[in-house]
Image: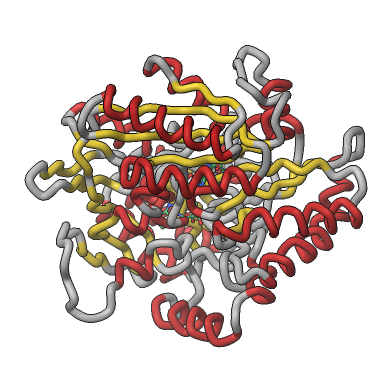
Amino acid sequence: MSPTQTQLLETLRRTVGAANVLTHEDPTTDLTAWELDWRRRERGRALAVVRPGNTQEVADVVKACAAAGTSIVPQGGNTGMVVGSTPNDSGTQVVLSLTRMNKVRKLDPGNLTITVDAGCVLQNLQEVCEKEGFLFPLSLASEGSCTIGGNLGTNAGGTQVVRFGNTRELCLGLEVVTASGEIWSGLTGLRKDNTGYDLRHLFIGSEGTLGVITAATMKLYPMPVTQLTAFAAVPSLQAAVELLGLAHKTISSGLTGFEVMGQFALSLVVKHFPQQRVPFWQDSPYCVVLENSDNESEEHARAQFERLLEAAMEMGCVTDAVVAESVAQAKALWHIRESIPLAQAQEGLNIKHDISINVSRIPEFVDLCNGKLLQAFPGARLVTYGHLGDGNLHYNVQAPEGQDQEKFLVEQEGPMNALVYDIVDAFNGSISAEHGIGSLKADKLAHHKSPVALGLMRAIKTALDPHNLMNPGKVLT
Ligand code: FAD
Ligand code: MLT
Ligand code: ZN
């Protein structure tokens, strides 16, 4: 360790307390939880994991790191999918973990807002809001461990975007520690504010490369009277898109979830979580889970769902369907959908393509891509599912049965990504709909984003972080 690093660690210990600076100096300290990404794609090595307890401490940590020329990796729940929240393997970076900063600062019922520390776990935030009769409509399968800071850092999507938008749309204000250690207090809660550039939107989705989000003011919605869930078998992706159109017409703004799941994706849930009862999966190439949130009554919502599903069956875009009879049944149906990424992880290392295409063109995209991909990579197992209501597919791939998974990734990920992303480009789509870029896709971004857009992004990065100390190597190479 260099004298500068030793001095930095001393300063950090003084700033946040020795118990909140974890290093490899003590061989019994296990830093795996901070150094290994959720998908187990890469293991880094940190100089230290630092856990500040308030915004001033974050600012002091950032200043100390800047003075020592040490780069910082902001981290929330470390559930990201693109290796964005873990350090590189140099042993020189500081992981700045926000998880001790987990307080609700203020709930303002009149303004329909809640202000929370960045390290607040999403599920805790949802529960606090629910207790007060409000809905915080961000929902991801990782909600038990991801944080609002990470959700903002990645501009997370999830299963309610079709009605409420991405995390960006739910945020009204931020508090940020800049790359030089200044505190920007932008927790206004205003719904209208046209006083120049909207800085909040620069930090949202910047994956920790421009500053550290320390708190946020988020929008709340009145809790709907009822949230009904239906699970339907559809004969094709085209049929799922037709059902979506019909659901928009019939349920309108009550449509708060519309997820599609391919047969192989569901078979992985059945295989790895055999206690779950998955309807229709053996008889249908795709199933859909829909949610209807209603402010009138459960009877009204049921009648709407019945009208929708009857019309869909008449049109031939639904072959079978079930509407949950209770909250427990609804949860079980959603649990099937949410278990897919976990089942995929159980099945082994995999390749993820988190893509978006205009909804109307998704069936055409999948037909074309399936054909080309299976021709080029015989035996590859396609795990297709996702947020069809948003045009966001998880077009994921599992190695052929019995094949060495590490070898499959090393040899096939590059050419497979290229094949899929070139088709995404041809459809004017995006190579990252909701997971972000991290370090996993940083080289791909350079190929798939326009040079003008990349130039503007680099200019923003240089202006806000001139010494490249905030999460270097992520997003931009
Ligand atoms: P981390 O993983 O810790 O960090 C993610 C990125 O944000 C990193 O670049 C990090 O540097 C940055 N960051 C973290 N905190 C801050 C901060 N305070 N200030 C600045 N930058 C920060 N994502 C979706 O969008 N939709 C889904 O449906 C979805 N489902 C998932 C299901 C599972 C089972 C899992 C494991 C993940 C899923 N994800 C999904 C991905 C992940 O949960 C989200 O990206 C989530 O928003 C990350 O939150 P986190 O607190 O874990 O952030
Ligand atoms: C999800 O929607 O479940 C995740 O974003 C998908 C994934 O893990 O690929
Ligand atoms: Zn997703």
Residue 368 falls in image quadrant: bottom right
User: Is 184 located above or below residue 217 in the figure?
Assistant: below
User: Is 188 located above or below residue 104 in the figure?
Assistant: below
Q: Residue 305 or 315: which is nearer the viewer?
A: 315
Q: Residue furthest front?
A: 314
Q: Is residue 401 left or right of residue 141?
A: right
Q: Is residue 6 left or right of residue 218?
A: right
Residue 393 percent across, percent down from the top left: 61, 50
Residue 247 percent across, percent down from the top left: 43, 43
**Split into 4 quadrants, where in the image is the C terminus?**
bottom right
Q: Residue 356 or 23: which is nearer the viewer?
A: 356
Residue 364 falls in image quadrant: bottom right
Residue 345 falls in image quadrant: top right
Q: Residue at x 43, y 28 (%)?
A: 229
Q: Residue at x 70, y 30 (%)?
A: 284
Residue 399 percent across, percent down from the top left: 84, 42
Q: Is any part of residue 26 visible from this angle?
A: no
Q: Residue furthest left?
A: 110
Q: Residue 353 or 201: which is nearer the viewer?
A: 353
Residue 217 percent across, percent down from the top left: 23, 52
Total marks placed: 0
Q: Is any part of residue 152 visible from this angle?
A: yes
Q: Is residue 446 left or right of residue 412?
A: left
User: Is 355 located above or below residue 100 in the figure?
Assistant: below
**Split into 4 quadrants, where in the image is the N terminus?**
bottom right
User: Is 287 located above or below residue 426 in the figure?
Assistant: above
Q: Residue 319 or 273: which is nearer the viewer?
A: 319
Q: Residue at x 34, y 27 (%)?
A: 303
Q: Residue at x 37, y 70 (%)?
A: 202
